[in-house]
Image (spheres, grey):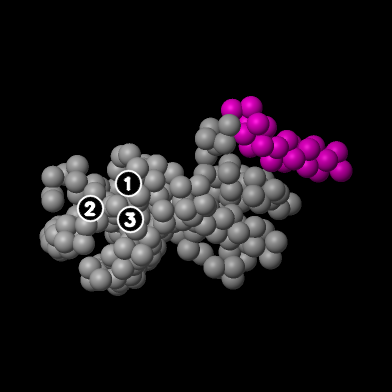
Amino acid sequence: MAVEYHLTIKKMAAELRPRERLAAHGVQSLSDAELLAILLRSGTVTVTAIDLANQILSRFGGLRGLAEAGIEELQAVKGVGPAKSAEVRAAFELGRRAACRPGEWQPTVRTPEEAAGLVMEEMRYFDREHFWALVLNTKNRVLAVEKVSVGTLNSSGVHPRELFKNAIRRSAAAVILIHNHPSGDPTPSPQDVELTQRLFEAGEIVGIRVLDHIVIGDNKFTSLKLEGLF
């Protein structure tokens, strides 16, 4: 009984450490497993919350795979019941929604890094190509994030009409084109370069500048403007 009590106290102390570190050093100081452990709150009789978090991350291949896991897949992990699986799914969904709603605070976009940062956490996990546009006013403040089209595993067809109709309706001065590569590699394809040039020329005609085209990979991006590709 004394041994079991000692193990229980030791496990409880281990599960408190991520929260203590967060309070002392900030959320950025925690590993993926520690952040997940805080969501899980507890492990099982035999493993701590951090051990369980590491098991989950290993099973799904890291955060990218975990973000795409469904409720039933999560509950297939021993120690993850309906409550824990719902909390994990809710946390990812909140992150995605926060990354996707710049219109609520209208940030100013001055650099490709700032533009990519607005959408990275949502777009990096898509398993299809999604083509979006940041719609900007004359001071480069974001008026809206327009979801223009959804393509296939390796292509996203976009017609200038689809891109510019809402930008015109919002009296936009400029747009920044953004799409993701599900492979995680943000290297622009020849088709990406060709599409960018076509949309840039269409923008010149309607009086809405295409400032950049950013390709989103897995926590990295490429700016076609910085690369001198248009």
Image spot of residue 4 (x, y percent):
81, 43
User: How far apart, in angstroms, are the residues tagged by discs 2 and 1?
Assistant: 10 Å
Q: Residue at x 47, y 53 (%)?
A: 103
Residue visible at 61% across and 51% down in the picture: 52
Asked whether 77 or 1 is in front, the reply is: 77
Task: Check residue 187 in the rendering and tell me which mark sits there, or answer none.
Answer: none
| Residue at x 31%, y 63% (from the top left corner) | 168
Look at mark 1 in the image and give the residue it sits on.
Answer: 138
Disc 3 marks a residue whose amino acid type is Ala
Q: Amino acid at mark 2?
A: Arg
Which residue matches tag 2? 209
Q: Position of residue 160 (x, y in %)?
A: 22, 68
* Residue that numbered label 3 is attached to: 172
- Badge 2 or badge 1: first in the primary sequence: 1
Q: Which residue corresponds to the image point at 58% horizontal and 60% vertical from the top-left?
A: 89
The residues colored magenta run 1-25
Query: Which mark's residue is nearer the viewer, 2 or 1?
Result: 1
